[in-house]
Amino acid sequence: MRTRPKKGSRTLAPDPAELVAPDRGDVVTRLRSIGTDGTTVSVIVGNKSVAKIDASDLEQLEVAAGAEWTTDLAGQLFDAAAKLAARKHALRLVAARPRARADLIRRLRMAGHADRHAAAAADALENAGIINDAELAEAAATTLAARAGTSRRAIETKLRRRGISAADASKAAGRATEDLDEREAAVEVATKRASRQRQPADPNAAKRRLFAFLLRRGFNSDDARYAVEQALRDAAADDDNELH
């Protein structure tokens, strides 16, 4: 049995270079359960652990003590080990913070997991109820809507950036902003912005900059235009009062 050095990474996918290459006459010596729940099994060839796989894969792969350690079996076990590594990595990612399915898959792929293993890991977590895009969207939208001066479009955009689908993002943003007066919110944002900035000599330049800022915050053009006029009028009135 020939062995190659391992990287020992806890998060990245197993590297094919880590695979223990079979020699003629090698056999699976034993199978050892890992952990208290026994869901992970270490496959031992000689005195070497050649793969850690999910116990449910044992029956499917027909792995048992005494089985010949062939190149074909090594490849199958490597694939099963890579699938398990992706699922464990996915669990660590969602333990750190709630994640959308698409974001989870993207991060797993970035870490080196194969597309099929990343998708399988997401499927497993979704089936177990650990990830749920609709619930995540509702919770995140509610939190975002509680912030002052937030528009529905801005909430929807932020949800999409987190990997939420367009449909789930739109539905969650709509529910979270049912009672929101976007024109009033736009005025609030514009007023705060205008009060913090020195007004340029050209009033039109101030309008353009403030209008563009509101559009970037997700407000529609009509509400943004109204808010700009209101905010700059209030700012001018405050300046007049200070002079007198």
Image: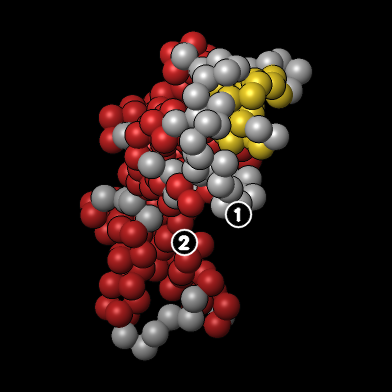
Residue occupying image coordinates x 38% and y 55%:
217
The extreme bottom residue here reads: 201
Separation (CA) of disc 2 from disc 1: 63 Å
Please state, as top left, top right, bottom left or bottom right, where the N terminus lies in the image. Answer: top right
Q: Position of residue 35 (x, y in %)?
A: 73, 23
- The numbered dot on residue 91 is none
Q: Tell me the colour scheme of the image.
A: secondary structure
Secondary structure of residue under mark 2: helix
Q: Nearer the viewer, residue 92 or 164?
A: 92
**SS type, badge 1:** loop
Q: Position of residue 13 (x, y in %)?
A: 50, 45
Q: Which of pointers 2 and 1 indicates the residue nearer the eye?
A: 1
- Residue 84 or 233: which is nearer the viewer? 84
Q: Quadrant of the C terminus?
A: bottom right
- Tag 2: residue type? Thr
User: Earlier along the polypeptide chain: callout 2 or callout 1?
Assistant: 1
Could you tell me which residue is drawn at 47 percent across and 66 percent down? Answer: 193
The quarter of the displayed image where residue 46 is located: top right
Left/right placement of residue 231 relative to residue 128 reads left
Looking at the image, the residue that sits furthest to the right is 36
* Residue occupying the point 44% across, 18% down: 61
Q: What residue is disc 1 on?
A: 5
- Decide: is 68 above or below 182: above
Are there few (<14), some (14-19), or many (20+) residues within 10 Å of tag 1? Answer: few
What is the number of the mark on residue 191? 2
Q: Position of residue 133 (x, y in %)?
A: 42, 28
Three-letter amino acid code of the residue under disc 1 = Pro
